[in-house]
């Protein structure tokens, strides 16, 4: 609705034939207040296993019935729907708390910080709004906090066979694809802490660093990813909080040169709620011109139904929102010889 200008004509004073206008601009009300997490706050540092107060501001959203709270790790591929099937590689984010109107505070309450939390973690709050049987919807907000254990790190371990055999004679399906030259993979690394809790510390954001004794066999990539670059043996050293652990790796793969493909998830975009959004990986490429296999996943925002997640182009219906919200998606591509790309990301901001 456009602002309405209401003007009144004032009579001229004295002999001056001047018309004065006194105008009031209507329809420029205050911005719509949106659903928002108030406690904890973005950027807070929280202790693992502690209890914090969770509180939300409902904004101008009417008819909220419940608010569900979920914890998940940064860039983790999550699903938050209850009772739905998972997609390949996705993780069910455990329901941390349900806030109701009669809670203290309303739609909030005491929230347990995950005992096994470490590093950046996301808190997602999803408000269910009832507008009748045919018009129910949800709105969400999420923040990033840092979770720190109070316990000390005792030892680092690898959740894999030791030594790790990659290639023809090894565990070729250990990471989901056939081992090949140029393959990129994650290594599952955990830390044993003095409180008896085992925490995943694979990502550098948890304080972990990697070093390969033979980069011609295994090269360290950004984000703690590893890449097969040749046949032979190497020792991987992992460090965190003053502790170290080593893993011997033996690589025996087809020595045919193979460069990993490059994923391109397209440019960030802004769309209106209710529109069909297309994610395009058509600009992804393989240096040798091999055909590519695609894998799209959602890593941020309240879960949407992602169609054609294994095609070059995926799509979803932009949900209703009360203020701009950002959804983040990840694309990995794999060539026919099993080499994976580094992940590519795209943000989609949905506006009311």
Image (cartoon, rainbow, N blue to C red):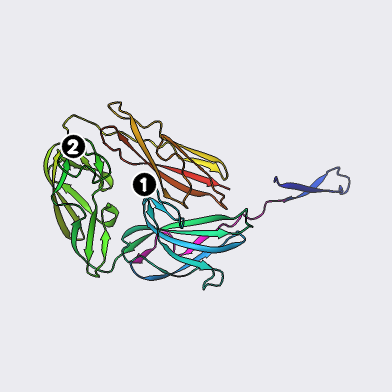
Is 30 contained in the magenta span?
yes
Which residue occupies 56% across, 52% down? 323
Count neighbours of disc 1 (C-alpha within 10 A) and say few if under 14, some if 14 to 19, many if 20 or more.
few
Describe residue 254's horizontal placement relative to residue 74 as left or right: left
- Residue 242: percent from left, percent from top: 18, 60
Which residue occupies 34% across, 32% down? 292
Describe residue 71's horizontal placement relative to residue 230 as left or right: right
Alpha carbon of mark 1 to alpha carbon of mark 2: how far?
27 Å
Prevailing SS of the magenta stretch: loop
Which residue occupies 59% across, 57% down? 33
Q: Quickly name the residue at label 1.
A: 88
Q: Nearer the viewer, residue 290 or 352?
A: 290
Q: Earlier in the sequence, mark 1 or mark 2?
A: 1
Residue 173 location, quadrant:
top left
Is 298 contained in the magenta span?
no
- Residue 26: percent from left, percent from top: 72, 51
Q: Nearer the viewer, residue 165 or 20?
A: 165
Range drawn in magenta: 26-47
Q: Quickly name the residue at label 2.
A: 229
For label 2, the SS is loop
- Residue 95: percent from left, percent from top: 43, 62
């Amino acid at each position: 609705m456009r602002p309405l200008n209401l003007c009144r004509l004032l009579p001229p004073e004295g002999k001056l034939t001047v018309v004065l206008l006194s105008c009031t601009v209507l329809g420029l009300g205050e911005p719509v207040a949106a659903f928002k997490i108030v406690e904890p706050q973005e950027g807070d540092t929280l202790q693992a296993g502690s209890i914090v107060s969770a509180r939300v501001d409902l904004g101008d959203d009417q008819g909220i019935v419940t608010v569900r709270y979920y914890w998940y790790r940064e860039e983790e591929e999550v699903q938050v729907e209850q009772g739905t099937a998972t997609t390949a590689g996705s993780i069910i984010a455990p329901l941390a708390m349900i806030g109701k109107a009669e809670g203290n505070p309303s739609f909030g309450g005491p929230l347990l910080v995950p005992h096994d939390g470490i590093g950046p973690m996301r808190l997602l709050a999803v408000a269910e709004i009832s507008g009748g049987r045919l018009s129910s919807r949800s709105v969400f907000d999420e923040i990033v906090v840092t979770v720190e254990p109070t316990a000390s790190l005792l030892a680092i371990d690898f959740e894999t066979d030791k030594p790790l055999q990659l290639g023809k004679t090894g565990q070729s399906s250990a990471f989901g694809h056939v081992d090949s030259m140029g393959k990129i993979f994650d290594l599952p690394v955990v830390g044993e802490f003095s409180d008896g809790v085992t925490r995943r510390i694979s990502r550098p954001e948890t304080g972990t660093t990697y070093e390969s004794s033979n980069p011609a066999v295994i090269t360290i990539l950004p984000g703690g990813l590893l890449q097969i670059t040749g046949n032979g043996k190497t020792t991987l050293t992992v460090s965190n909080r003053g502790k170290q652990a080593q893993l011997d790796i033996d690589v025996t793969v087809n020595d045919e040169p193979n460069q990993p493909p490059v994923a391109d998830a397209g440019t960030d975009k802004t769309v209106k709620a209710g529109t069909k959004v297309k994610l395009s990986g058509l600009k992804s490429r393989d240096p040798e011109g091999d055909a590519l296999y695609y894998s799209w996943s959602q890593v941020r925002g309240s879960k949407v139904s992602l169609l054609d997640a294994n095609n070059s182009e995926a799509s979803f219906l932009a949900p209703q929102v009360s203020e701009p919200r950002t959804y983040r998606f990840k694309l990995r591509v794999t060539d026919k010889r099993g080499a994976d790309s580094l992940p590519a990301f795209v943000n989609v901001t949905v506006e009311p």
